[in-house]
Structure formats: C-alpha cells, structure tokens
Image (tube, grey):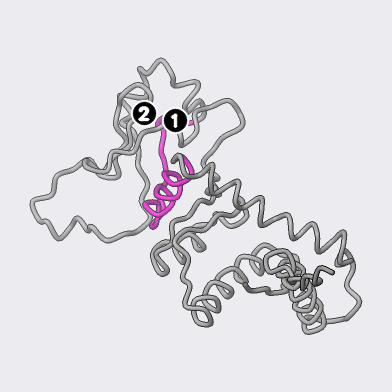
Amino acid sequence: MDVEATRSVRQAEVGSTLTMLDRTAERFDIPPEWLAADTAYGSEDNLVEIVLKRQILPFIPVIDKGERTDGTLSRSDFIWDDENDRYLCPEGKDLRHRRRNYSDPERFSTEMKPRRYRASKADCQICALKEQCCPNSETRSLQRGKFEIVRDFARFCTASAFNEIASRRRKKVEMPFAHLKRILGLNRLRLRGPMGAKDEFTLAAIAQNLRKMTTLCPATVPSTPSG
C-alpha cells in the first residue's frame, strides 16, 4: 500500500513507518488498528507516537535497557503497583519515589515525568537477596520514565494471545522484502542518491503489486465453441 526508501539507520526506518501510516490514512482512508514490528521500532518515542497520538495497538517488543545480564535482578523482576505509586521487590518490600507525607498537596505533583524509586536502606541491609539485587550499593533504585505507562501497555500487547497472530502476519509481510531482494534484484541499487533509491523502490513495489494482481484477478480465457 505504500513504500518509502530511507537510509539504513534505525531512526530513519522508524520515521518512514510513521510517514507511511499517515499517507495510507490520507490516500485510502485506512487507519490501522494495530501494528506489528520488531524490536528496532520499540523505542519510547516511537511507541508514544503510535499509541498516544495515533491510537494504534502496538505489537512491538519494547527496547528495555533495564534488563541486566550480570546475574543481578532486572527491572522485570520488580512488580509495578500503579494504585500505590510504587514498585514491589521479589521480597515484597516497596520502592518509592517519596517517603514523606506533605501537608501541602501542591508539593506533590501528579504530572507525568521521570521518577526514581528507591528502597528503604533498612529493608535492603537485612534482605536475603541483597547480593543478587544491589551488591555495589546500599539500596536498590529504579528509574521510571515519563511515558513508562505506554511501554507497559506495549508489553501487555506483546504478552497477549493476539501477539502470535500479529507475528505470523508480520512474517508474511516480510516475505515480499525477500522477494524484492532475490527476485527483483534490489540487493544492489542502480540509481544514486535518495531520490534514485526512492524511484527504484517505487517501481519495484509497482511490479510486485502487478504480480500479486495476476494471482488475485486471473484473466478469464474465453471458452472455444464446441464443434
């Protein structure tokens, strides 16, 4: 339905997705209900654009730098308690971004912004999991981004049962990419510059769509009159 040639960098590829979504909605009046993509499209900025601004369900793995590979507990080992505005550690202790109760409600802002949640020093010092949780610091802390709720929603979508269906359909879409490279010879471009690449990809997409149309709408052969 659309094609956009970009440089081979992640930011440009992600930006082209938003461009094609807007063009498809404008040309054909077909706004998508959901979008499936790989982890390269799971940045916070991209998810905010897709979920909040375009209201599209994201079946996209989230880029999460909170996962640790050194054997210590990762962010995913902690449970977020939205009702009480806190994280719960595997031992059931809470991590809060504030532990004082102010009499002036204006000192506590509910505005969406990055916050750091820390455990109590008294809880961490006697915890049996301290060496596995925070061996190099007195307490464990977690940073919660401004739009972490959007990232949590994307995690919820990828953990749902429909994610398997979305992944299968995404793989079907990726097959034409392999066809463009192996059959139509787009493993190497012949024209130079961004405009040349755009022209080649557009012509290749047209050829691919014409090929699909021959299978969807086969030509009818007139029957020969019987003698």
Quadrant housing residue 9: bottom right
Mark 2 or mark 1, which is nearer to you?
A: 1
**Image x and y of residue 48, in percent:** 44, 62
Residue 55 in the magenta stretch? The answer is: no
Residue 175 in which image quadrant: bottom right
- Label count reads 2
- Whether 112 is drawn above or below 154: the answer is below
What residue sits 46% from the left and 37% below the top?
A: 75
Q: Position of residue 28 (x, y in %)?
A: 52, 79
Q: Which mark is residue 11?
A: none
Residue 154 is one of the magenta-drawn residues? yes
Residue 4's place in the image compared with 177, above or below, is below
| Marking on residue 77 | 1
Q: CA distance from mark 2 to mark 1?
A: 7 Å
* SS under mark 2: loop
* Residue 197 percent across, percent down from the top left: 80, 78
The stretch in magenta equals: 137-159
Image position, residue 51 (x, y; %): 42, 61
Cβ atoms under marks 2 and 1 closer than 8 Å: yes
For marks 2 and 1 on the same chain, the one whose residue lies earlier in the sequence? 1
Tell me the residue at 48%/72% (across/down): 30
Q: Mark 2: which amino acid?
A: Cys
Residue type at numbered disc 1: Asp
Tag 2 residue:
89
* 107 to the left or right of 56: left
User: On the picture, is 137 further left or further right than 191?
Assistant: left
Question: Which one is nearer the viewer's eye here, 1 or 74?
Answer: 1
